[in-house]
Image (cartoon, helix red, strand yellow):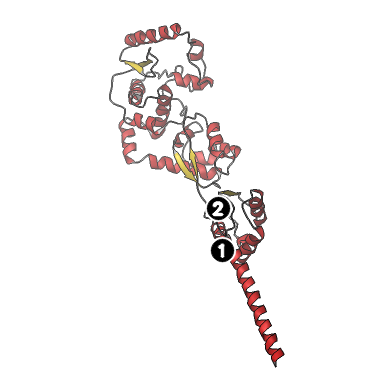
Amino acid sequence: MKKKKKGLKYALIGLFVTGSLVLLGMYLVMFAPNVKKDGFLYIPTGSTYQQVQDSLQAHDFLKNSANFDIWQRIKSYYLYVKPGRYELRKGMTNRQLVAILRSGRQTPTKLTFNNIRTLDQLAEKVSAVIEADFESLRQAFSDPDFLEKHQLSAHEVKAIFIPNTYELWWNTSAQQFVERMRSEHEKFWNDERRKKAKARNLTPIQVSIIASIVEEETKKNDEKPLVASVYINRLRKGMPLQADPTVKYAIGDFGLRRILHVHLKHDSPFNTYIYGGLPPGPISFPSVSSLDAVLNSPPTDYLFFCASSDFSGYHVFAKTYSEHLQNARKYHDALNRNRIR
């Protein structure tokens, strides 16, 4: 009888120890901190669970990969792998980690672009922060279906990309990015801005084209509206714009300091010394300040402007050609004195 009681006692102790070990194991699997450091886990589109596990190990995120694997199987995460950029924090448990991965609760990435001029530069900038690569973005920018859908030419498409800071999901595709920028463009062009454009007899695309020229003419926000007024006045009078930045764009050299006669002869629809009206599209991605400068341009009689001879970055404005020639002569004399070619 005593032996039976003793055996039962040992059995109960054994069960208690076994249960304790199971509970301890479950605690370690579920609640023990398992993420070793802060960082971001990137899961490409189409990834399998094995690839996720390989990435976690390659970047040394986990203290115990086996425990993570046990919990993800309990939660069937391997059936619900979602692409994205996920923020991992030091001390996260397997329960927390699997929860964000399984639900697709990724952390957005930020895209900021400004001071760029070409679609290739934009593609390079964007591909550095989202999953879409350079080539897929280039193709999306010129996709015939997208252009037709939104009634845009290949030259006009640049107008939909308004420099700013945007939050994007890392696994955004090239097509999704372009549609997102189109949506942001529509938000920018609210009723108030459209009314201002209409009052100047301009479409949003035309505003963007003028703003892109203004952007290249001056970095001084306080004089941008005056520069815009000159181009609007010239358009109204049927005068050629004769904008030097369009020549630089046409020949592909924005670093050119001095426009020579040979440059003015370069045959391109973007050369506003040869072709009248607006160029076929923006020559850069104009900032919000330049776009609003066109929309808020004051009524003036100015038809000409020239860089100031003090090289301050500002310009001097003129109503007549003779007055403009005097200003231009002062500027060119200053260039010669400073040996700027």
Does any portion of residue 173 appear in the rendered image?
yes
Q: CA distance from mark 1 to mark 2?
A: 13 Å
Instruction: Give the camera-side residue of 97 and 120.
Output: 97
Q: Is residue 240 left or right of residue 261?
A: left
**Amino acid, disc 2:** Lys
Vertical relation: 176 (above or below) 102 = above
Instruction: Give the camera-side residue of 325 and 96.
Output: 96
Instruction: Give the camera-side residue of 276 and 33.
Output: 33
Vertical relation: 121 (above or below) 166 = above
Going by the picture, which residue comes out furthest to the bottom? 1
Judging by the rendered image, the residue that carries numbered circle 2 is 90
- Quadrant of residue 299 within the rendered picture: top left
Q: Is residue 324 left or right of residue 63?
A: left
Say what secondary structure mark 2 lies in.
Answer: loop
Residue pictured at 38% horizontal, 17% vertical: 312
- Quadrant of residue 8 within the rendered picture: bottom right
Vertical relation: 84 (above or below) 3 = above
What mark, if any, has residue 31 been given in the picture?
A: 1
Does any portion of residue 75 appear in the rendered image?
no
**Amino acid, disc 1:** Phe
Say what secondary structure mark 1 lies in.
Answer: loop
Determine whether label 1 and label 2 are within 8 Å by CB.
no
Please tell me how crowded label 2 is: few (under 14), some (14-19), or many (20+) other residues with Cα within 10 Å.
some
Going by the picture, which residue comes out furthest to the front? 2
What mark, if any, has residue 64 been given in the picture?
A: none
Please tell me how crowded label 1 is: few (under 14), some (14-19), or many (20+) other residues with Cα within 10 Å.
some
- In the rendering, at what x and y percent does residue 112 appear? 48, 37
- In the rendering, at what x and y percent does residue 132 appear? 58, 42
- In the rendering, at what x and y percent does residue 106 appear? 52, 52
